[in-house]
Image (cartoon, rainbow, N blue to C red):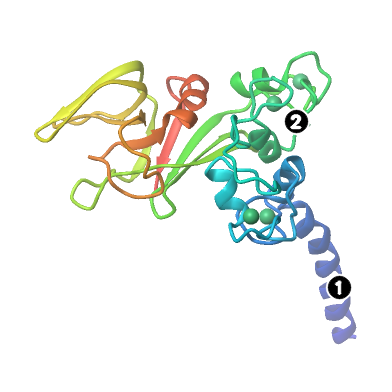
Amino acid sequence: MKYKLLLSASIMVFLALMPLSVDATPTTNDADGDGLIDRFELVIGSNPGEKDSDKDGWPDRGEVFNGYDPSGETQKKLEVSLLERDSDGDGLSDYMEANIATDHLDLDSDDDGYIDGLEIQYGFSPLDPGPNHYGKRIEVNKDRQTLSYFVGPHHVNTILISSGGLSTPTPVGEYKVEKKLPVHLYAGADYYLPNTKWNLLFKYNVRGNYYIHGAYWHNNFGKRMSHGCVNVSYDNMEHLYNWADIGTPIKVS
Ligand SMILES: [Ca+2]
Ligand SMILES: [Ca+2]
Ligand SMILES: [Ca+2]
Ligand SMILES: [Ca+2]
């Protein structure tokens, strides 16, 4: 009797977990494990089951991140990178729409009269026609050298960063956007970087405040090398800067 009860209980637990484990990760399914989620691969025409769709020796992810077409025959650099393409012109790139699970060819995925990009800008869900307002947040992961940003349950984007080098590490902790500066000068004993665009101040410090900001002087995103700030490419920083509000939480881990 006891055994039967235990068995039926474990079957129930199993049944209850089954659909959840499928539903819980719909935005991150990556069948070939190449770092490009299946939904994005379908949008850009690469094969979600093949790391190197066009068999040219260059993995899909590398081709996409360097501005090439992973399913193309030619090795010509694309005029607009597949990461930045915004097919429906709603202010969200196809890549972001794949992350969020909105329709990259439909300006208003939930048909509530508000376009997807504006809903993400103002903290609403582009997949929920109701008036629910969600919080925004930014997460910096130093181990992965990535920055991700979210609106409520929606993962909008993950981008490569350069955080501080070994002797000038980016401080770990929970912060928020204190100030937004469209242009800023960074200068120190051995550097002078004027007219730097899109600066989000997140921690005051007597020896120089900490920012997330655009960086035009290097292209080593994914590697630690800054003086303590979080460097982001100009291609990625403009949307992040315009999207973030004063007070948006920032977690650095
Ligand atoms: Ca993939
Ligand atoms: Ca390839
Ligand atoms: Ca779009
Ligand atoms: Ca909408």
State the mark number for residue 214: none
Give the labeled residue for mark 2: 104
Q: Amino acid at mark 1?
A: Ile
Residue 182 image point, x, y percent: 37, 15
> Does any portion of residue 86 appear in the rendered image?
yes
Q: CA distance from mark 1 to mark 2?
A: 40 Å
Look at the numbered disc 1 and say if its residue's Cβ is closer than 8 Å to ligand 1: no
Where does residue 24 sit, x and y in percent of width and height?
Answer: 72, 52
Of 228 and 177, the residue lying toward us? 228
Q: What residue do we see at 71% from left, 54% from top? A: 29
**Residue at coordinates 19% horizontally, 31% vertically from top-left?**
205
Q: Earlier in the sequence, mark 1 or mark 2?
A: 1
Considering depth in this image, is 236 or 9 the residue closer to the camera? 236
- Ligand 3 within 8 Å, label 2 CB: yes
Say above or below: 207 vs 91: below
Amino acid type at mark 2? His
Q: Is 19 drawn above or below residue 220 in the view shown?
A: below
The residue closer to the viewer here, 115 or 176, is 115
The residue that disc 1 covers is: 11
Measured as percent of width and height from the top left, residue 181 is found at 34, 17
